[in-house]
Amino acid sequence: MKSLSKTAAICLISFIFISCSRTPEREIIHLLNKKYANLYVNEPQKREAITELKEFLKENHLSDQTYPKIQEYVHKISDGHVVLYRNNFMTLNTYVSGLTFIPGSPYVKSCESCTPAVTEGKYQILEINDIPLEKYLKAHANSVAASTTPARTFRTLRKLSENQTVSEIRLKLQSVDRTIVSTTLNWQQVAPGTHQCVSGERLNENTFKLNIYSLWCDDKTRPKETRNQVLERFKQEFDNVAQSINKDDLIVLDLRENGGGGDQEVEYVLNSFSDKPLFMYRYQYLAVHTSPFRKWLARLSIQPADIWAKEEFLYSNPQNKTAYQFLENKMITLVSEGCFSSCEGLASSLKLENRSLLLGSTTHGGAGDPIVFPIKNSDFSLNLPTCLAWQKDGNLFEGTGVEPNIKTTQKFTDILDSVLEESLKKVRE
């Protein structure tokens, strides 16, 4: 009898363990409900999207075949950092089409490698694959991870110039003089070592434009690089450009196409323009151990603080010296929906610490120290923000972004970069 009872107990325990172990599909929902800090920003909409995803996963298993559709549901959450990855995503090939945009705008500048080639000028996109642009953007709304509608449009269009999945794309463009141009994109794999993070150009005798495209200068062909190697590559590129800046130059810092990166890179840039500690973020992580009951109470605002760890602050440290410093140079900074994540921290710090005037359009609106969580029993991982992050003025980054001091957008009728021209005009006033 004792032996039988012992066997029954073992069977019962095994049944409970097997029944309660999470499938990959349940693990996705568990991570979103327990580890996702930005869930508490625009909460009803995000929870509704997670519920839709949960219902889909009841009938569909996570696999290479269902991955694209599941990713669309994930993108409905509307957070630029929430992304479902294949675990080999770091080694995926990157392809470029040769299509270039006016920085920070939806307007095409040129496409030398297109068929036929698009000569340099300024063009509106009228149709993509014979679909009017507005309908195309609506149909592909969940093809990208984004925190705001303008950011979603920006990212969807930028997939026309760089992508990891390529297909035939036909464009109908209209130039400023109303000439219609039809062309097809020709995708080419990015060669190793061609990824550029920083560039510069002298606009005139006393004005230098510093373009920072990324604050994470990794080489996609070398997935085993250390964090320090990535940082050092950024410093090297930044310094190579910075050595051409004169002490009396007006510096135009262009962040309109910057997708973010690391806090150390942000600090390096800040320390190039200030010898004082500058405010970067105020942040608060989700508590490591919080019972579901307490989280439920927090949603009712009965014990809201119980699900959060203590509030912390991050400032730049001027003791981390940079190779070049421009403490007295006057500067302006250009931003757009393309400025995302740590780029927004850089822009916010320069603005709110009164080091630079910001011009352009509101930034993407995404933050929260994202961490990649492996999904158990699968070949996928989920990238999730783990903390809330605020600007110095108390505004959240997520869903809000950084407001420029002066709002201005690219005018299609102006052949020149009108945001840049408006910025230079403001400085001369």
Image (cartoon, rainbow, N blue to C red):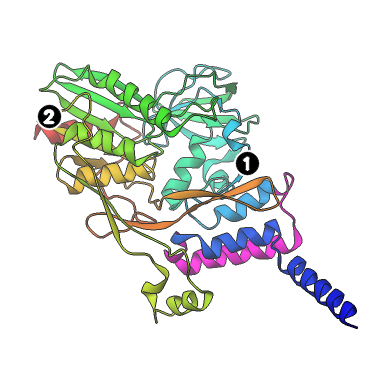
What residue is at 40 percent from the left and 57 percent from the top?
387
- Looking at the picture, which amino acid does disc 2 mark? Asn
Q: Answer yes or no: do the residues labelled 2 and 1 have beta carbons within 8 Å?
A: no
Mark 1 = which residue? Answer: 87
Q: Nearer the viewer, residue 104 or 146?
A: 146
Q: Is residue 342 left or right of residue 249?
A: right
Residue 114 lies, with reference to residue 83, above or below; the image says: above
Q: Residue at the location (16% across, 46% down)?
A: 353
Left or right of 102: which side holds 331? Answer: left
Q: Residue at x 42, y 63 (%)?
A: 41
**Residue 423 is at least partly visible in this image:** no
Mark 2 to mark 1 CA distance (whole Å): 45 Å
Q: Majority secondary structure of the magenta segment? A: helix
Give the secondary structure at mark 2. loop
Which disc is residue 176 wearing?
Answer: none
Q: Is residue 140 above or below residue 25?
A: above
Q: How crowded is the residue under tag 2: few (<14 C-alpha within 10 Å), some, or many (20+)?
A: some
Q: Closer to the camera, 368 or 401?
A: 368
Check disc 1: other Cα within 10 Å, few if <14, some if 14-19, many if 20+.
some
Q: Which residue is mark 2?
A: 329
Type of residue at label 1?
Answer: Asn
- Compared with 2, 329 (above or below) is above
Inspect the magenta stretch and tell me whether residue 63 lies in it.
yes
Q: Does residue 360 belong to the magenta stretch? A: no
Residue 372 seen in render: yes
Q: Which quarter of the figure has residue 334?
A: top left
- Residue range in magenta is 38-66
| Residue for point 74% across, 45% down | 65
